[in-house]
Amino acid sequence: MADGPTARRLEGKPIADEIRAAVAEDVIAFTAEQGRPPGLAVVIVGRDAPSTVYLEQIIRGCAKVGIDARFVELEGEATEASVVATIRELNADPRVDGVIVQMPLPPTIRLRSVIDAIDPDKDIDGIHPLNAGLLRLGYDGFLPATAHASVEILRRSGIEIAGRDAVVVGRSAVVGMPAAFLLVKEDATVTVCHRRTRDLAARTREADIVIVAAGHPGLVTGDMLKPGAVVVDVGINIVDGRIVGDVEFESAARVASAITPVPGGVGPLTNALLLTHLIRAAERHAAVTAPAPAAGR
Ligand code: NAP
């Protein structure tokens, strides 16, 4: 038996490049038609949060394809009321099509108040309860971009999902649960695991597809996988200054048939999909605000 990794690497970057090229064309068409580019506002409360780097990447990615993206920055001591008021202003701003809010928020600000304030039609990262509910019901809404990416990388890599047994490790509202609902929508049979799952390895060993979104480096190892399983590693952890996933890549790649690398798997696709969500929001926004056609004679 070979010692080295045998699994196919499911690279996110080439797929993300394809998506970005299509978005760039859509942005050109939208801008020509509307006389303005699609607009994204990213609300940040203080610049210290670890997510700021990720949000800067999004802003740069938008600029590259012609989207008007900007930070709306509040002081680190901003009150919940001022964050909510800022979001409401952005909801009413005709040049803004999408709103993202930096997570995690300072502990003094209640997440629910902020999420509820976002206009669901501008909620391009799918965190508003309306969009979460639409996903739960299997209807179209805005999807959380990371969960979307974790399933889209399977679809775009030609991995069959329908009828297969899937395990999702992690049940967060932004990644694990929406990924599980998306897999169900794709006709997989899905088990969701979390910290209280009694025997995680017994669950993952049963699965044809394993999506891991736990925030725990090396949680899933090769001996926890069924030979030939497909593994999607959503985790982003910094260990000894290196970015690593939630899956122990070396051992997993010897057992799996396909696996996403970290970095370079789900991450690049997440950012690209967020742009597609923004274009969709902008097109819907433009259709809603378009002047009514003049009455025919
Ligand atoms: P989270 O809110 O902390 O949720 C983690 C989930 O994993 C929880 O449901 C938790 O269970 C479960 N879990 C943690 N340790 C476990 C263990 N030992 N065994 C079984 N389940 C365990 O994290 P998140 O926001 O969903 O993010 C998950 C990971 O994805 C993180 O590494 C994050 O950095 C990464 N991420 C990546 C991207 C990307 O673009 N690739 C974007 C966002 C996040 P309980 O519910 O029981 O606590």
Image (cartoon, rainbow, N blue to C red):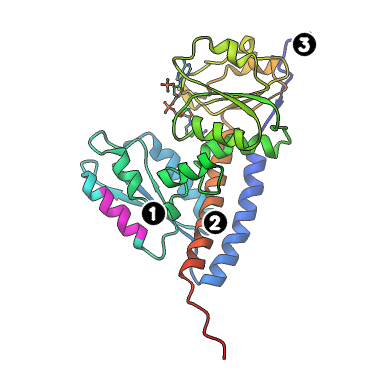
> Which numbered disc covers residue 2?
3
The residue identified by callout 1 is 119
Q: Where is residue 136 drawn, in percent x and y?
A: 51, 39
Q: Quadrant of the N terminus?
A: top right
Disc 2, ligand 1: is the CB inside 8 Å?
no
Q: Where is residue 197 drawn, in percent x and y?
A: 49, 14
How packed is label 2: few (under 14 Cα within 10 Å), some, or many (20 or more)?
A: many
Tell me which numbered mark, 1 or 3, is placed earlier along the sequence. 3
Element type where label 3 sits in the image: loop
Residue plotted at (63% across, 60% down): 25
Tell me which numbered mark, 2 or 1, is placed earlier along the sequence. 1
In magenta, the rendered stretch is 83-91
Q: Nearer the viewer, residue 25 or 111?
A: 111
Q: CA distance from mark 1 to mark 3?
A: 53 Å
Query: Predominant secondary structure in magenta?
Result: helix
Verify CB contact (< 8 Å) between mark 2 and mark 1.
no
In this view, 9 is above or below 93: above
